């Protein structure tokens, strides 16, 4: 067992020392909303909110066509529009997309994402607390321009953050939604070679 651990550590160190690693910083705008299912807008809100995100990323080459490219992102999220029937939960998360980068120019990003809720502003209505852990799938495309990069990412949360019921006078119009996070992010960043 000791020999196996030693061999794994030596292999990992040699891979890292021989890899073409990069670290980067990025920022951008996000279209965010609370959705009810896979990319399905909640019926009681009218539009996406546009907010800010920023973070750091790391990239290490796995093969000549595949890289592992995780990120750590501060992201404003939630439903921020002034809709009297909306949930109006303005939230902030620290997200960790664990992306794999396919191809080189342009490239495709795909991988799971985990998010940790760090702040909630419930505005006028309080329907209860959101779950503090969010998880889902991140997909994107990007392009490198010298040391700069531009990416367009789509994230769909799978974790039901809150269950809200809106009772109407007409029983056929009652709304029961299980809200999840949906994000579309446009980022501009800069890579530093290690």
Image (cartoon, rainbow, N blue to C red):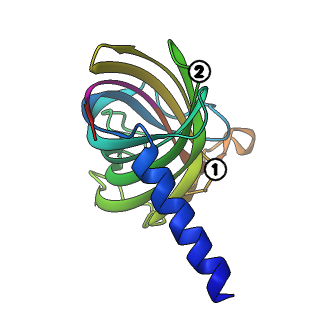
Residue wearing tag 2? 103
x and y percent of residue 113 in the render? 53, 49
| Residue 31 lies in quadrant | top left
Counting residues from the start of the chain, the first of labels 1 and 2 encountered is 2
SS class, disc 1:
loop
- Per the model, the C-alpha gap separating discs 1 and 2 is 27 Å
Residue 42 visible in this rendered orientation of the protein: no
Seen from the viewer's position, the closer of residues 80 and 5 is 5
Residue 113 visible in this rendered orientation of the protein: yes
Check if residue 131 falls in the magenta segment: no
Task: Point out which mark residue 101 bears.
Answer: none
Q: Quadrant of the N terminus?
A: bottom right
Relative to residue 167, is residue 13 drawn left or right?
A: left
Residue wearing tag 1? 158
| Residue 188 lies in quadrant | top left
Seen from the viewer's position, the closer of residues 122 and 140 is 140
Q: Residues within 10 Å of mark 1 (few under 14, many from 20)?
A: some
Between tags 1 and 2, which lies in front?
2
| Residue 63 lies in quadrant | top right
What is the count of numbered marks?
2
Q: Main secondary structure of the magenta part?
A: strand
Seen from the viewer's position, the closer of residues 17 and 77 is 17
Q: Which residues are magenta?
A: 184-191
- Vertical placement of residue 110 versus 164, above or below: above
Relative to residue 154, is residue 147 drawn left or right?
A: left
Q: Give me the residue at 24% from left, 31% from top.
A: 27
Seen from the viewer's position, the closer of residues 172 and 53 is 53
x and y percent of residue 50 in the render? 31, 27
SS class, disc 2:
loop
- Vertical placement of residue 111 versus 43, above or below: below
x and y percent of residue 4 in the render? 67, 78
Q: Give me the residue at 34% from left, 53% from top.
A: 93
């Amino acid at each position: 067992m000791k020999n196996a651990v030693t061999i794994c550590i030596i292999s990992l160190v040699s891979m890292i020392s021989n890899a073409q690693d990069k670290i980067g910083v990025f920022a951008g705008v996000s279209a965010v909303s609370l959705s009810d299912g896979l990319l399905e807008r909640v019926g009681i809100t009218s539009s996406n909110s546009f907010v800010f995100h920023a973070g750091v990323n790391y990239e290490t080459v796995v093969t000549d066509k595949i890289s592992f490219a995780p990120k750590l992102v501060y992201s404003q999220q939630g439903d921020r529009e002034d809709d009297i029937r909306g949930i109006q939960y303005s939230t902030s998360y620290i997200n960790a997309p664990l992306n794999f980068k396919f191809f080189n120019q342009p490239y495709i990003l795909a991988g799971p994402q985990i998010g940790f809720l760090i702040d909630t502003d419930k505005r006028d209505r309080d329907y209860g607390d959101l779950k503090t852990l969010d998880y889902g799938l991140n997909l994107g495309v990007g392009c490198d321009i010298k040391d700069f990069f531009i990416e367009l990412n789509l994230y769909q949360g799978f974790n039901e953050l809150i269950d809200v019921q809106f009772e109407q006078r007409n029983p056929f119009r009652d709304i029961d939604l299980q809200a999840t996070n949906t994000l579309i992010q446009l980022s501009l960043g800069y890579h530093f070679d290690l």
